[in-house]
Image (spheres, helix red, strand yellow):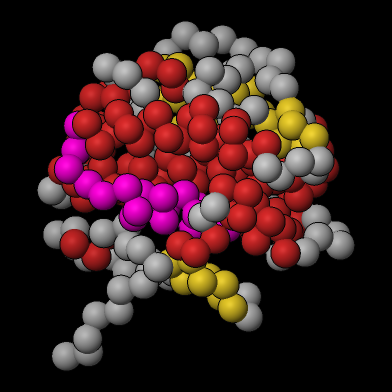
Amino acid sequence: MDDLLAAIGRAFGTSTLAGLAPGLVVPDPDGWIPATDLTGADITLLVTAARRRWDARPHVAAALMWKAYSYWLSLPAAFGWVVARRVPHLTAAQVLVRLDAPDAPVRIGLRPGIPFTHDDPSALRRVLLDEHVTPLLDAFQREVRIARRPLLGSLSAGLAHATRHAVRAVPGASTDDIDTLLKALDLQDLIEWEHGRLRRRTCCLAFTLPEPRICSDCCYRPHPN
């Protein structure tokens, strides 16, 4: 874990990031929500927090919350893989969540003693997708009318951005790791990656906010006036 945190510090200039628990590990779970609860009835907590944060239609607020959630969830996976070919078990059973962070829509933390996968990118599909993202998106879609493809697009883009940050922080690392991890999740077709530029093929819907926001990787380009 120390080498992972050190790389995060090099990439961002600090290892204390708004969307991650300090030191990644949560020694005291008081005030944190187990991610397993969010895959069930407590999904309403995530949806309510989204509506509270963004003045937007329910599906737009949900999409933006998921974009934040999937990015911060992806970041430990990306850095673990690039740094040491080890991915923490980011299953719902191992992840804790806070929705009251002042500087981020969501904060992700890991339980103490979290295991790691070793040298096998395909294991990422089980520990991230099968045992966390898929049941969480199932719960999300029971609460909000929103298609799954743009949500998976946010996961794909979030993992790609996180991996790119990790590659920049680790000497000798290659952007080929972006393709490796996305192929492990079968999400490589949801982004375009050319000449160091990442472009989504789905939209997070930020451009529909009352004050529209066009993300740097957005597939939507407004027509000039």
**Magenta highlight range:** 143-161
Q: Could you tell me which quadrant the N terminus lies in?
A: top right
Dominant secondary-structure state across the stretch colored magenta: helix
Spot occupied by residue 77 in the image (x, y as percentages of width and height): 64, 41
Query: Relative to residue 154, is residue 25 drawn left or right?
Result: right
Q: Tell me if residue 102 can be seen.
A: no
Q: Residue at horizontal 47%, vertical 49%?
A: 155
Q: Residue at x 56, y 48 (%)?
A: 185
Q: Does residue 133 appear left or right of residue 172 in this picture?
A: left
Question: Horizontal and vertical percent for residue 31?
Answer: 42, 13
User: Is residue 40 found left or right of 126 in the rendered image?
Assistant: left
Is residue 77 among the parts visible in the rendering?
yes
Q: Residue at x 35, y 63 (%)?
A: 202
Asked if the magenta segment contains residue 153, the reply would be yes
Identify whether 202 is placed above or below 73.
Answer: below
Viewer-side residue, 13 vs 55: 55
Q: Does the magenta segment cover residue 92?
A: no
* Residue most extreme to the right: 172
- Tell me where residue 79 appears, x and y as whole percent: 70, 45
The relative height of residue 221 versus residue 174 in the rendered view (above or below) is below
**Where, by quadrant of the figure, is residue 23 drawn?**
top right
Residue shown at the point (67%, 36%) measured from the top left: 123
- The number of discs equals 0
The relative height of residue 102 versus residue 219 in the rendered view (above or below) is: above
Give how far across and how far down residue 9 sits, in percent.
71, 46
